[in-house]
Image: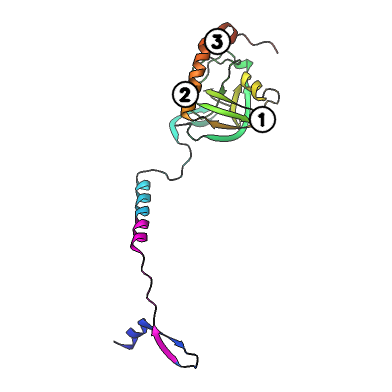
């Protein structure tokens, strides 16, 4: 074995008395087979997910449906699952009473409902007034509000209940209701609608 080859296996160090001695170079630690295979498996899973177009971290997905208001396009979310947003709530009333909403229903300012720009129609949400801590469940049946910073428009009845009516605009947090709870709320809403006296529910707005 040549000196050059030997130098790859040994290295010199100074002994306490100034003499050079040789000792074997430490061999590199071998990668444990189990750890190596675990890392390869994780890498393979990541590559498969990326190759199939599956995002590891993603926000709410769009449904592909959209509409344009005042030159701006709004994209409807494919699902309300996991939706939670903090922003400003406003309300709308008399000028829109009796008109058709985006869902095709007639807007009733005396009913509890709300408008949202991108949540799927008929989504149930919990709206909480961050100032008063009052909260209630509402069904999205319309589109709006189309003003920057505002995330939800309440019917007049809902605005009064939540303490939004007098100030006009308040900070809120809007959270989509889980599907099982939303089904129960929808059933209760339908039952209440059947029992409601329509002559009272659809009364004309009083002059303000």
Residue 176 x %, y %: 52, 31
Q: How crowded is mark 2: few (under 14 residues within 10 Å), some or many (20 or more)?
A: few
Q: Nearer the viewer, mark 1 or mark 3?
A: 3
Precedes in sequence: disc 1 or disc 3: 1
Q: How crowded is mark 1: few (under 14 residues within 10 Å), some or many (20 or more)?
A: many
Q: In the rendered image, which quarter contains the N terminus? A: bottom left
Q: Name the residue under label 3.
A: 196
Q: Residues within 10 Å of mark 3 (few under 14, many from 20)?
A: few
Residue at 30% in and 87% down: 2
Q: Mark 2 points at which residue?
A: 183
Residue 65 colored magenta?
no
Residue 162 x %, y %: 64, 25
The reply to whether discs 3 and 2 touch (Cβ–Cβ < 8 Å) is: no
Residue 78 x %, y %: 44, 32
Residue 62 x %, y %: 45, 34
Residue 23 colored magenta?
yes
- Choose between 5 and 205: the one closer to the eye: 5
Please, what secondary structure does the residue beneath circle 3 have?
A: loop
Q: Name the residue under label 1.
A: 170
- Choose between 183 and 66: the one closer to the eye: 183
Asked if residue 103 shows in the view, the reply is: no
The magenta segment: 20-40
User: Number of numbered discs present?
Assistant: 3
Precedes in sequence: disc 2 or disc 1: 1
């Amino acid at each position: 074995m040549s000196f050059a080859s030997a130098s790859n296996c040994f290295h010199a160090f100074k002994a306490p008395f100034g003499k050079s001695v040789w000792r074997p170079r430490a061999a590199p630690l071998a990668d444990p087979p189990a750890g190596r295979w675990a890392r390869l498996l994780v890498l393979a899973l990541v590559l498969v997910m990326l190759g199939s177009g599956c995002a590891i971290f993603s926000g709410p997905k769009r449904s592909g449906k959209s509409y344009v208001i005042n030159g701006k396009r709004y994209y409807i979310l494919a699902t309300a699952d996991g939706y939670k947003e903090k922003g400003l709530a406003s309300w709308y009333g008399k000028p829109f009473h009796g008109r058709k909403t985006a869902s095709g229903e007639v807007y009733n300012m005396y009913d509890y409902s709300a408008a949202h720009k991108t949540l799927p129609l008929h989504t149930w949400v919990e709206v909480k007034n961050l100032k008063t801590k009052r909260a209630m469940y509402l069904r999205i049946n319309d589109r709006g509000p189309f003003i920057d910073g505002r995330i939800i428009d309440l019917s007049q009845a809902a605005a009064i209940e939540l303490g939004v009516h007098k100030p006009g605009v308040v900070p809120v947090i809007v959270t989509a209701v889980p599907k099982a709870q939303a089904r129960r709320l929808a059933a209760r809403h339908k039952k209440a609608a059947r029992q409601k006296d329509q002559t009272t529910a659809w009364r004309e707005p009083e002059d303000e």
